[in-house]
Image (cartoon, rainbow, N blue to C red):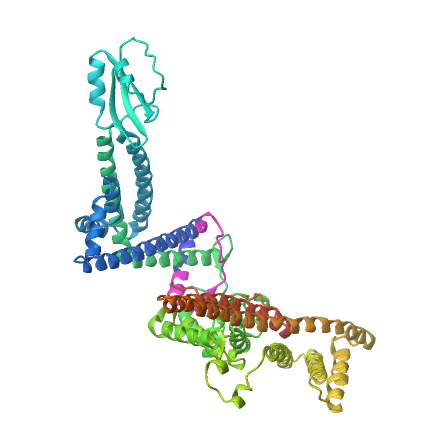
Amino acid sequence: MNSEVETFLARLQELGVVDITRSSRPVDASSKAQFELIEHCRRRIGQLALLKAADEKAAAEAGKAAAASNSVAYAAAKADAAGASAVAELIAAAAAPSGSVKSAAAERVAKIPQEELLAAVDSLFENREKIKAEIAETKAELAAAEPWGSFSAADLEKIAAAGLVPHFYIASKKRFTPQWESEYPLYQLGATEKNIYFVVLAQEGEKLSFPLQEVQFPQRDADAVMLSLKQLADDLARTNAELSAIAADHIPQLKAFREEAMSKVDLYLAQKGGETCAEESVAVLEGFSLVENDSSLQAALENEPVYYINEPAKVEDNPPIALKNNFFGKLYEPIGELYMFPRYNEHDLTSYFAPFYMLFFGLCMGDVGYGIVLLLLGLFVTFKMKQFASYGKLVAWLGFGTIIMPLLGGTFFGGKLYEMFPIPENIASLFFSDLKMFWFAIIFGIVQIIFARFLKVCFAISDKNYTTALGETGWMLLIIWCSLTYASMEAGFEVPAIVTYIGAYGGLGLILLFSSNTRNIFVRLFKGVSSLYDITGVFGDVLSYIRLFGLGTAGGILGLVVNSVAMQMSGIPYLGWVLTVIMLLFGHTAVLMLSALGAFVHPMRLTFVEFYKNVGFEGGGRKFRPLGK
């Protein structure tokens, strides 16, 4: 039966329109091993991608060096390199293999079967780390052997044949006494800047009394160690060349292997997600498909030896969710997915929060200049990096919002537009002061809260929940009246009586009477009175939007600081304006990146907490993942 189920699911996988209910995590040892293989393959692909980038950078630098080969500076650099140690030259050769080594490596890699490619990559990386460790040990051995000169194991054998026993010592040049050479059969073997290395010979069986502690003589001389080091460097060069050959030409094969493994584990989890009955002779599977694919799916199932039931999805089945938004809302789906998907019978809020998120982002950035940079960056990614086009469009729209909102205050790369350019006074007076931007942020937040309550009313009406719709209408009216009343006290105007009757009395009445569905009027009034406590939550939500003003102002101040420091550098003789330009570029880039981080996170917080809460969003759905290849 298992083979029949697997065959049937494989054909569904080819069709690619059915979401078979299955786990997204390992369910047993086999699927755990598959997940580990997929993750391991992903890590190796990442390592090879970094290696490929490093090789390309090295090739570019080598090309620049070749182009400058006739210059005096390059000749001097070559002269310095010629004086480098033999060990450094060996390691450099291993890091940059010769053309013949690369050609031989490419031939060896080309013969590796695709199914053995990952194992070969593992072996090469492990071998490289092993060789590096051996090189480190051998370099330490060479450092210990070099000061003893060319004294070798063959010399030790000759000394032993003569009936002598060598004793090896190291003494600092200050402590070494030349008189020892006349008192003992002492022979200097080598020296460094600080120490002298020597041997004292004694007759076999003779007890030597010398004022220094004897040291261990290296097992191999420097020439033998250097020969081993050269062999290790050659091995490392071959390994690096093979890894570079795989990184250059075979990453797509590893990606295809990973995708195939993901497809297999998806199929396996779908098979394990079914139930078996009738003594395991019948398998029962549950799946979901989009309505527009219903006819093609039924036509495919008619040709399969299966019995199927086709019925509309039910809320209690927790069907998967496939979001459908317009071209603008679709760009913001990745942001909404960072929180959670809506339930099956719940409304998707992506297209509703998208315009607010864009404008909130602009308020937090707080600088028109940064908006222009983001817009240009987004357009560049959209047209030049097709695989990231959707993210490029999102960045471009966020840049557009960053041009619109900071334009209210007139901030441009840390300065004020009306101070930097000759703008007429009647136009310059239209720009908002910091105090006006503070109140604008709060008013904008109130608008979003009211809009969220309005959506809740509309959703309740569409779901035929009229009691909730009336209660939320009361809250909407009350929030509007409270906002207008406070504004009238600050701005000195009078709220019309009709607004007070509708907003205050009408709103309170709707809240008291329709905050509960119960038919008992006393219980309904009690719940209505107790629900008025939520006004403190609404007040807290409104205050949360102050962060929009705070982040935008902070970004503008940081930009102003960058300008001030840069202008002070302009007074430095000769290099002043060069340093000023460098400071402006580096400083504003850093401020832009810092501001963008805050502008991404905080509007998301306002969306997922204040906006979602006031709409009544619950979430908990799962993404539609059709079984496919």
Position above or below: 121 against 230: below
Tell me if 280 is positioned left or right of 535 in this view. Answer: left
Is residue 10 shown in magenta? yes
Q: Residue furthest top?
A: 205
What residue is shown at x 50% (from left), y 63% (from top)? 286
Position above or below: 575 against 148: below
Residue 67: percent from left, percent from top: 19, 60
Q: Residue furthest front?
A: 573
Residue 231: percent from left, percent from top: 23, 38
Tell me if 21 is positioned left or right of 436 in this view. Answer: left
Q: Quadrant of residue 86?
A: top left
Near-viewer residue (530 or 286): 530
Quarter occupied by the C terminus? bottom left
Task: Residue 321: tell me if it is visible.
Answer: no
Q: Quadrant of residue 130?
A: top left
What residue is shown at x 64% (from left), y 72% (from top)? 616
Tell me if 606 is positioned left or right of 284 in this view. Answer: right
Is residue 77 shown in magenta? no
Task: Residue 541: tell me if it is visible.
Answer: yes
Position above or below: 171 against 252: above
Q: Which residues are magenta?
A: 8-32
Q: Quadrant of residue 628?
A: bottom left
Near-viewer residue (437 or 605): 437
Tell me if 33 is positioned left or right of 475 in this view. Answer: left
